[in-house]
Image (tube, helix red, strand yellow):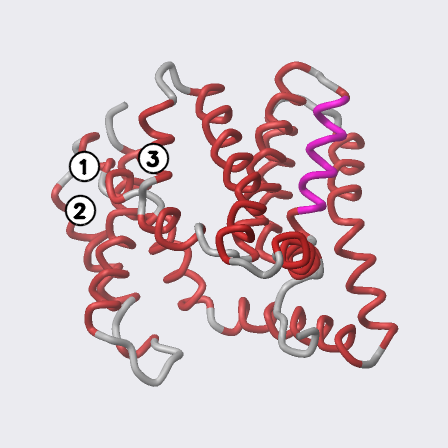
């Protein structure tokens, strides 16, 4: 498995432990991973409560959206990552707003655990750092937080590089290939980001229309999404029309919402 796995080690080891404790049964394994779902959902609600007067409805809208309800219920690395990453972001906000040293340390630890679960949890680091700086946290302290959050993954990749054989070598090469793909296929990355963001909530994808963006803005966003999902940008040899259309619609909705939030009436 180590030669095939494309994630850091935390998720596979947690899955191995769940299979051992649950005897390999599907329902037992799902139940043992349920705390990650609860942690992610609870942190999402807590984050929303920091910024919204009525946080429950938007949180529920996200939780029943296709990206979450249809995807993250499986025993995947993304599920574990979300169970660490969202609490890390919530605690980072608490630490910055309330000058809470324990929340500051806990958020760094959880961010590190998220990074050891899935490489794309890297998004937590710049988001938290930007919020820290915006709230006036000293730069030196922000640097310490970033170093602590990244230290576990850095140690894992260094060990994988130095070990030079078996699963460790595979881990390093997989991380390297993932990095190369990110830069060599920006159109694919942008497709995934925009479609998944829209897929987190079908309501949220087109929420920007409630802010009444101009017709030109809506048409521009729709055209941009159509171009992005054109066959010329495909990496896979065959993309089904229904997948292309679904991705384009979700991406267009995301672009409309971003446009409206940036320029439209509040």
Going by the image, does 81 lie left or right of 266? right
Q: Is residue 160 above or below residue 216?
A: below
Looking at the rendered structure, the secondary structure element under dot 1 is helix
> Quick one: label 3, few (<14), some, or many (20+) residues within 10 Å?
few
In three-dimensional space, the C-alpha distance between marks 2 and 3, rounded to whole angstroms, equals: 13 Å
Q: In the picture, residue 39 is in which quadrant?
A: top right
- Residue 108 highlighted magenta (yes or no): yes
Query: On the image, numbered disc 3 is attached to which residue?
Result: 262
Task: Say which element carries label 3.
Answer: helix
Which one is closest to the eye, mark 2 or mark 1? 1
Viewer-nearest residue: 22 or 155? 22
Separation (CA) of disc 3 from disc 1 = 13 Å
What's the mark number on residue 209? 1
Residue found at x 62% / y 41%: 84
The answer to which of marks 3 and 1 sits earlier in the sequence is 1
Residue that appears at 36% across and 47% down: 69
Which quadrant of the rendered structure holds the N terminus? bottom right
3D distance between C-alphas at marks 2 and 1: 8 Å
Which badge, 2 or 3, is on the more N-terminal residue? 2
Report the side of 154 relative to 239 (left or right): right
Residue 246's image quarter?
Answer: bottom left
Q: Position of residue 260 (x, y in %)?
A: 27, 36
Residue at 37% in and 39% down: 63
């Amino acid at each position: 498995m180590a030669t095939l796995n494309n994630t850091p080690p935390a998720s596979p080891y947690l899955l191995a432990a769940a299979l051992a404790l649950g005897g390999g049964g599907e329902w037992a394994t799902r139940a043992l991973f349920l705390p990650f779902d609860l942690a992610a959902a609870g942190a999402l609600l807590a984050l929303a409560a920091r910024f919204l007067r009525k946080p429950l409805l938007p949180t529920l809208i996200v939780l029943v959206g296709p990206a979450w309800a249809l995807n993250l219920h499986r025993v995947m690395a993304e599920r574990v990552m979300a169970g660490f990453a969202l609490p890390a972001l919530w605690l980072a906000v608490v630490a910055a707003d309330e000058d809470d040293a324990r929340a500051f340390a806990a958020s760094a630890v959880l961010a590190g655990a998220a990074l050891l679960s899935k490489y794309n949890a890297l998004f937590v680091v710049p988001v938290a750092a930007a919020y820290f700086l915006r709230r006036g946290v000293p730069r030196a302290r922000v640097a310490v937080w970033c170093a602590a959050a990244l230290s576990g993954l850095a140690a894992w990749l260094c060990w994988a590089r130095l070990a030079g054989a078996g699963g460790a070598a595979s881990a390093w090469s997989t991380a390297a290939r993932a990095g190369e793909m990110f830069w060599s296929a920006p159109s694919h990355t942008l497709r995934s980001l925009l479609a998944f963001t829209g897929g987190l909530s079908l309501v949220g994808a087109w929420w920007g229309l409630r802010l009444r963006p101009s017709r030109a803005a809506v048409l521009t966003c729709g055209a941009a999404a159509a171009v992005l999902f054109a066959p010329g940008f495909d990496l896979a040899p065959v993309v089904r029309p229904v997948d292309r259309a679904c991705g384009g619609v979700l991406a267009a909705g995301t672009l409309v919402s971003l446009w409206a939030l940036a320029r439209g009436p509040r």
